[in-house]
């Protein structure tokens, strides 16, 4: 049983930030006052495993 479930995950991958968000990426960073550090999917999975968490992925362009 995981320690926690993150119910709102937008992946900080190049594909999501540059392809899916496209021109909205920089505006989102300004709005949330943070710079998104890009990661590959393997690193994200390792981060969640290390924290004993699972994530529910949200689609942007579904």
Image: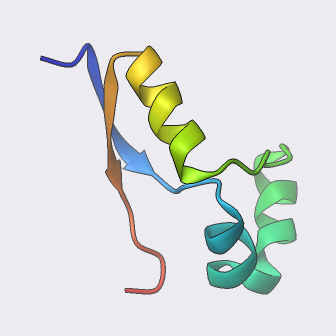
Q: Residue furthest left?
A: 1
Q: Is residue 28 left or right of residue 26?
A: left
Is 41 placed left or right of 22 in the picture? left
Relative to 5, is 9 above or below?
A: below
Q: How is the image coloured?
A: rainbow
Q: Quadrant of the C terminus?
A: bottom left
Total marks in image? 0
Residue 24 position within the rendered picture, expressed as x and y whole percent measured from the top left: 76, 78
Q: For this view, does 12 lie left or right of residue 55?
A: right
35 vs 41, left or right, is: right
| Image coordinates for residue 55, horizontal then vertical, percent | 34, 41
Camera-side residue of 48 and 35: 48
Residue at the far front: name it.
42
Q: Residue at x 40, y 72 (%)?
A: 59
User: Is the residue 7 above or below the residue 19 in the image?
Assistant: above
Q: Position of residue 33 (x, y in %)?
A: 85, 45
Q: Position of residue 51 (x, y in %)?
A: 43, 16
Which residue appears at 12% of the width and 17% of the height?
Answer: 1
| Identity of the residue drawn at 62% across and 70% down | 16
Q: Splitting the image into 4 quarters, where does residue 3 fall?
A: top left
């Amino acid at each position: 049983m995981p320690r926690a479930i993150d119910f709102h995950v937008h992946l900080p991958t190049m594909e999501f930030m540059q392809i899916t968000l496209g021109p909205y990426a920089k505006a989102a960073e300004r709005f949330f006052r943070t710079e998104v550090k890009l990661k590959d999917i393997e690193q994200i999975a390792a981060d969640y495993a290390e924290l004993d968490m699972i994530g529910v992925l949200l689609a942007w362009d579904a």
